[in-house]
Amino acid sequence: MVNMKLTERGFIQVDEQCKTSVQSIYAIGDIVEGLALAHKASYEGKIAAEVIAGLDSSVSYKTIPAVVFSDPEIASVGLNETEAKKLGYTVSIGKFPYAANGRALSLNAGDGFVKIIGDSATGTILGGQIVGPEASNLIGEIGLAIEKGHKLQDIAHMIHAHPSLGEIIIEAGRRSTWARDSPIESIENLRLLLLARMTKFHMADDDCRRVQML
């Protein structure tokens, strides 16, 4: 009988390379600690295979997404606001609703939001949560931003096709306090500039009211 070390909860104990306490035996997936997710297990299998092949690979779970395939979908990656604060971060939050996105409205799917968590000191993206249609697909963009160490301003500067659900992520980044403090991404300055131009060219009151809601 193979005598492998177990955790206090009864899972097989592994290191960052998926190695067990028994030489040449690796463990992944639901039999080790962590979230019981198919994509986590697949990722661990890839790492284990690379280590067996002689590569110096190791697991990193900071961008493993968690998804609930409900209606609407719910997805999360990285840290949420509470977790970030517990780790000592002063957070900068960017949030934007599906209801203000043209593609979502054309799909009659205005319920939901994108929320991006950033470090207010550096602007570095720490995590994100999405509730709404295609959340399972959209969350990958935030995960990539975390993995590459991107900042809230990087998200704000991106260009997505219009109309598309991906634009919600851009708008969430632009509405973070960190991005708003940047001269380039100052939503307040943009709003005032648009109002001034609308007034100059005598644009309709309805159009002016839409800009005031930015």
Image (cartoon, rainbow, N blue to C red):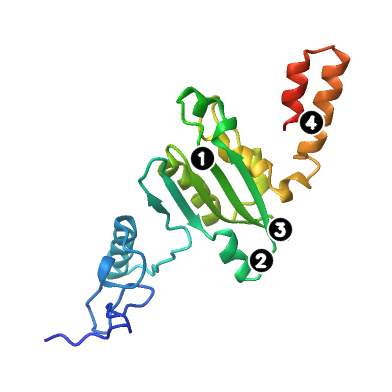
Secondary element at image label 1: loop
- Amino acid of disc 2: Tyr
- Amino acid of disc 1: Gly
Q: Which residue is mark 1?
A: 112
Q: Nearer the viewer, residue 135 or 59?
A: 135
Secondary element at image label 3: loop
- Amino acid of disc 4: Arg
Q: CA distance from mark 4 to mark 3?
A: 23 Å
Q: CA distance from mark 1 to mark 4?
A: 24 Å
Q: Residue at x 73, y 17 (%)?
A: 206
- Amino acid of disc 3: Ser
Q: Quadrant of the C terminus?
A: top right
Q: Quadrant of the N terminus?
A: bottom left
x%, y% of residue 87? 61, 71
Q: CA distance from mark 3 to mark 2?
A: 8 Å
Lower position in the chain sequence, tag 4 or tag 3: 3
Secondary element at image label 2: loop
Task: Give the number of the disc on residue 89.
Answer: 2
Q: Residue at x 60, y 31 (%)?
A: 100
Q: Is residue 87 left or right of residue 78?
A: right
Q: Which residue is mark 4?
A: 191
Residue 93 higher or lower than 113, as above or below? below
Q: CA distance from mark 1 to mark 2?
A: 26 Å
Q: Which residue is mark 3?
A: 120
